[in-house]
Image: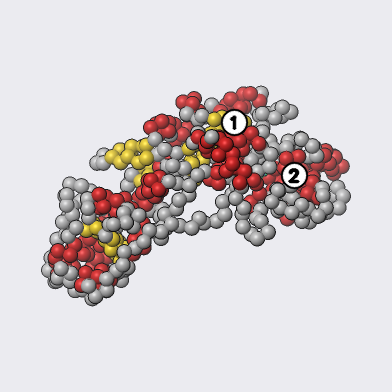
Amino acid sequence: MVGLPDKAVSEARERVRSAMIASGLALPARRITVNLAPADLPKEGSHYDLPIALGLMAAIGAISHDALNGYTVLGELGLDGSLAPIAGVLPAAIGANGRGEGLICPASCGPEAAWASPEMEIIAAGSLIQLANHFKGTQVLSRPQPKVREADGVMLDLVDIKGQESAKRALEIAAAGGHNLLMVGPPGAGKSMLAARLPSILPPLSPAELLEVSMIASVAGEIVGGALTNRRPFRAPHHSASMPALVGGGLRAKPGEISLSHNGVLFLDELPEFDARVLDSLRQPLEAGHVAISRANHRVTYPARFMLVAAMNPCRCGRATEPDFSCKRGANQRCAADYQSRLSAPLLDRIDLHIEVPAVTAADLILADPRRPRPRHPGRALRCTRTHGAYQCAGRKRGAGGDRQARCRRARAAARSLRGDAPFRAGLSPRLAGRPHSRGPRRRGCGAPRPPCRSPGLPGAHRRVTPGGIRVPVDTTTESLADLSR
Ligand SMILES: Nc1ncnc2c1ncn2[C@@H]1O[C@H](COP(=O)(O)OP(=O)(O)OP(=O)(O)O)[C@@H](O)[C@H]1O
Ligand SMILES: [Mg+2]
C-alpha cells in the first residue's frame, strides 16, 4: 500500500483480504500494489476500504473494468464482507454530484447521500456480494430515499418557567434576532432552565441551512442511520471543554462545538468556569462566522455562525446581587469583580444582550401551571413547598450542631419568607421545590415527620406532561415571535 497511508488505511489490507475471501473471491497469489494517488497527500480514515476492494475486484475480473467509471466510492469493510457506515458521506455526495459523478457507499449511509440531489445515481449496498450482483445485473439495488429523523424526546418549553417575565422576553428577542445573550443571576434563578427551553422557540431549519448543518454533522460522524434532522442544533459543552473540542482541530482537524452549533445555539453554562484562553478563541469566529483550522500540511475552514447563549453567577458565592447578603471573603463588589474579571472585555463586547436574572420569587414559583388541573385543595402546593423548604433548611443546619429549638425557629422563619414576593433566600433554593420530596434530608422534631407531597402544583419542571403524556406546544411564544418580526 503506497501513497502516505495512515494506520487505518494500512490496516485496510487485512480487512479487504478477509472481506473478499468471505465473499468467495480469491485474490491471486502474487504481490499486489495499491497506489493511492496523489502520492504526496496523506490519506487517513477507513473509507478507502471499499474503493480498494472494488479496484481489486475489477482487476481480477469479478466486475467489469468500466463498471466503476463515473463513480465516487467510499465505505468501510467488515471482515465478513459487509459495509460499515462512515463519516462524511453527505459532503462526498455533494462533491460527486458537483463533478457529475454517481456515488457508491454503504447502505446505512444511502439516505444521507440521497439528500445531495434527487437526480444523482446512488448505489448503497449492504455487502460486497450485493455490489457484485448489482454490477452483474442479477440483483439491482434501488436508489435510497432521503430520510428525516423523528425528533427524539419531547422538547422542553418555556411554559415551564414560572415568573421571570423579563428573562423570557429577552430570550424571545434573542431568538428572533439571533442575538448573543448573557444571563447573570444567583443559583437556582432558572438560567440553565431558560436556555434549555430556547430550542422550542427557534424556527425550523430552511432546506439550505439543513444541508449546511448536516454536512458538518456528517464530517463529525454525528448522523445516525443516514437521517437528517430539521431541528436547529443546540450544543451545551461542559466548562472543562478544551480548545480543539470547542473551536475544532485535533489530529484530523474535526469540527468543534462552534461549528456543530452552526445555524443554532451554543450554550456555555457557568461561563467564567471555562478556560480563559478557550473563551477568547471564540472571539474571531464570533466575528467572522467561520473558523479556519490550520495544520502543517492542510487547512480546513468550517462555518461557525451560531448564537452564543451564556449563563453565569454574579460572583463565586453566587449571591453578590442580593441586598442582604455579605460575602465572607470581602466586599460583595470585590467578590463579583474578581469573578467577572475571568471574562475578557472583547468577548463580553461580542454579546449583544446582557440580562440580570434575579432569584425567582416564591409567589411566582407556586403559580399553578395553566396546562394542569388545579390542585383539589387550593393552597396545598404552597403548603407543600413551605414544609419542604422548612425541612431542607433545618436538615442543613443539623450537622452544624445548633440547638434544636433555634433550628426550628430558623426553619419556620425561612418557610414564612416563601409566602409573598420574597425571593428564595436564606439557604433555600428553587431547586428544592423542583425535587422529589423523598430525596430531601430526614429529620425528627420540629413537629410531625415530613408529609408525602402529592401536589400537582409543585414546579417539577422536568416531569410535567399533559394527562395524555404529550407535551403541548406553547402558542404564546410563537405569537410573541410573530409580534417581534412584525
Ligand atoms: N422560574 C422558575 N420556574 C420553575 N422552576 C424553577 C424556576 N427557577 C428555578 N426553578 C427550579 O430550580 C431548578 C434549578 O434551576 P436552574 O438550574 O435553571 O438554575 P440556575 O440559574 O441555572 O442555577 P445555577 O446558577 O446554580 O446554575 C430548576 O430545575 C427548577 O426546578
Ligand atoms: Mg445553571
Q: Vertically, is 83 above or below 164?
A: below
Residue identified by numbered label 2: 366
Taking the spot 33% from the left edge, 44% from the top edge, the residue there is: 253
Q: Is residue 304 left or right of residue 383?
A: left
Percent position (x, y) of residue 133? 24, 73
Q: Secondary structure at mark 2?
A: loop
Q: Residue type at mark 1: give it.
A: Ile
Mark closer to the chain start, 2 or 1: 1
* Quarter containing the C terminus: top right
* Quarter containing the N terminus: bottom left
Color style of the picture: secondary structure
Taking the spot 62% from the left edge, 31% from the top edge, the residue there is: 356
How far apart in space, not on screen, are marks 2 and 1 (Cα)? 24 Å
Percent position (x, y) of residue 60? 14, 70
Q: Vertically, is 349 above or below 43?
A: above
Q: Is mark 2 within 8 Å of ligand 1?
A: no
Residue identified by numbered label 1: 355
Relative depth, front residue between 54 and 102: 102
Write down the quadrant of residue 121 in the picture. Answer: bottom left
Q: Residue type at mark 2: give it.
A: Ile
Q: Is residue 20 left or right of residue 428?
A: left
Percent position (x, y) of residue 216? 37, 47
Percent position (x, y) of residue 100? 22, 53
